[in-house]
Image (tube, helix red, strand yellow):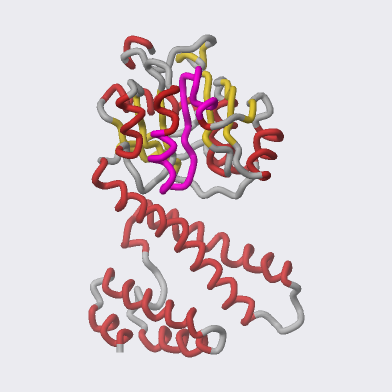
């Protein structure tokens, strides 16, 4: 690894043919803890972790107990890999804060989706190899997050092929794969992630609310309603995502695909009795779906 990475990432024991690294985590929130735990599973060693909140302290103690709770500066000193997992608007200040403490050839990565390597410029100027390395995954705050990183894709921005090689080694050791993203395309990349994860969560929540209104009154508890939603909506949503990823827009089914405007109108009217905002979102998304299906007539009708 030394020859292929230009000196970045020295270590002792081997992790699948690549050196094991000492790691500092800044900080131990949902993503930082999951990445740190995943790196440890891969054979690396998290030696220090910054933890600004009581929850972060608990994360370190329960999930990466070998790590010493430390300041960001201490977490970055005397390690070979620094993982910055703070809110986007704090990455640049953390990079400036830790740059004087970095050892030669250290790897510094942040996990933000919307930002490239630019906020890490102080670390690069200090001699670090810098990466923007975003796990394309949603995080719950427990060990399921670490499990979900196995098979996860990583959106990576690197300076050159050496950086991409380092990122590929790290991701592969954690069970993932990298997809290179250009610096200027990070915001668009992250918007795509938000559509797939955040907006999908909103749609599933809306579908659950609509289903709850359709169930026999008083027959289901809140837990029972969630169970019914999981049974009815879960396989349907999973199949829709799988089919669309495999077939693109040709996978579309349902009343909009059939250009059945009367059914769509009845849906909208019924949803107004559940929640006006859900009905409005359904109308707008149906119009957008119709346009994707080259049905401008239905889209225009729904826009009225």
Question: Number of numbered discs present?
Answer: 0
Q: Which of the 4 quarters of the picture holds residue 96?
A: top left
Left or right: where 140 falls relative to 113: right
Residue in the picture at 56% in, 68% down? 205
Q: Which of the 4 quarters of the picture holds residue 40?
A: top right
Left or right: where 2 falls relative to 294: right
Q: Magenta span covers which residues?
A: 73-96
Residue 46 image point, x, y percent: 58, 24
Residue 60 image point, x, y percent: 65, 34
Left or right: where 217 falls relative to 139: right
Closer to the camera in the image, 268 or 127 = 127
Residue in the picture at 37% in, 11% down? 2
Q: In this view, does 276 lie above or below 139?
A: below
Residue 142 image point, x, y percent: 65, 44
Residue 250 image point, x, y percent: 32, 62
Left or right: where 155 falls relative to 20: left
Q: Which of the 4 quarters of the picture holds residue 143?
A: top right
Position of the N terminus by quadrant: top left
Position of the C terminus by quadrant: bottom left
Closer to the camera in the image, 82 or 208 = 82
Q: Is residue 126 above or below residue 57?
A: above
- Asked if residue 226 is among those painted magenta in the image, a careful observer would answer no
Residue in the picture at 55% in, 48% down? 139
Residue in the picture at 42% in, 44% down? 112
């Amino acid at each position: 690894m030394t020859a292929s990475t230009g000196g970045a990432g020295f270590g002792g024991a081997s992790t699948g043919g690549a050196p094991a690294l000492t790691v500092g985590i800044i900080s131990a929130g949902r993503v930082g803890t999951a990445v740190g735990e995943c790196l440890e599973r891969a054979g690396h060693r998290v030696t220090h972790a910054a933890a600004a909140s009581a929850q972060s302290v608990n994360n370190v103690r329960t999930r990466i107990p070998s790590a010493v709770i430390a300041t960001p500066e201490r977490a970055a000193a005397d390690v070979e890999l620094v993982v910055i997992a703070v809110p986007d608007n704090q990455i640049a200040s953390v990079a400036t804060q830790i740059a004087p403490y970095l050892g030669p050839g250290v790897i510094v990565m942040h996990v933000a989706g919307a930002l490239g390597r630019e906020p890490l410029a102080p670390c690069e100027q200090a001699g670090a190899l810098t990466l923007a390395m975003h796990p394309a995954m949603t995080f719950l705050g427990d060990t399921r997050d670490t499990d979900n990183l196995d098979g996860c894709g990583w959106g990576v921005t690197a300076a050159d092929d050496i950086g991409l090689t380092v990122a590929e080694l790290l991701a592969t050791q954690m069970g993932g794969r990298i997809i290179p993203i250009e610096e200027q395309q990070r915001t668009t990349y992250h918007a795509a992630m938000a559509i797939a994860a955040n907006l999908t969560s909103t749609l599933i929540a809306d579908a659950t609310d609509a289903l709850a209104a359709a169930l026999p009154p008083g027959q289901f508890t809140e837990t029972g309603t969630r169970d019914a939603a999981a049974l009815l909506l879960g396989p349907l949503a999973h199949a829709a995502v799988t089919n669309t990823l495999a077939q693109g827009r040709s996978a579309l089914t349902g009343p909009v695909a059939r250009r059945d405007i009367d059914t769509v109108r009845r849906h909208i009217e019924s949803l107004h009795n559940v929640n006006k905002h859900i009905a409005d979102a359904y109308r707008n998304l149906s119009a957008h779906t119709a346009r994707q299906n080259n049905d401008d007539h239905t889209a225009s009708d729904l826009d009225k």
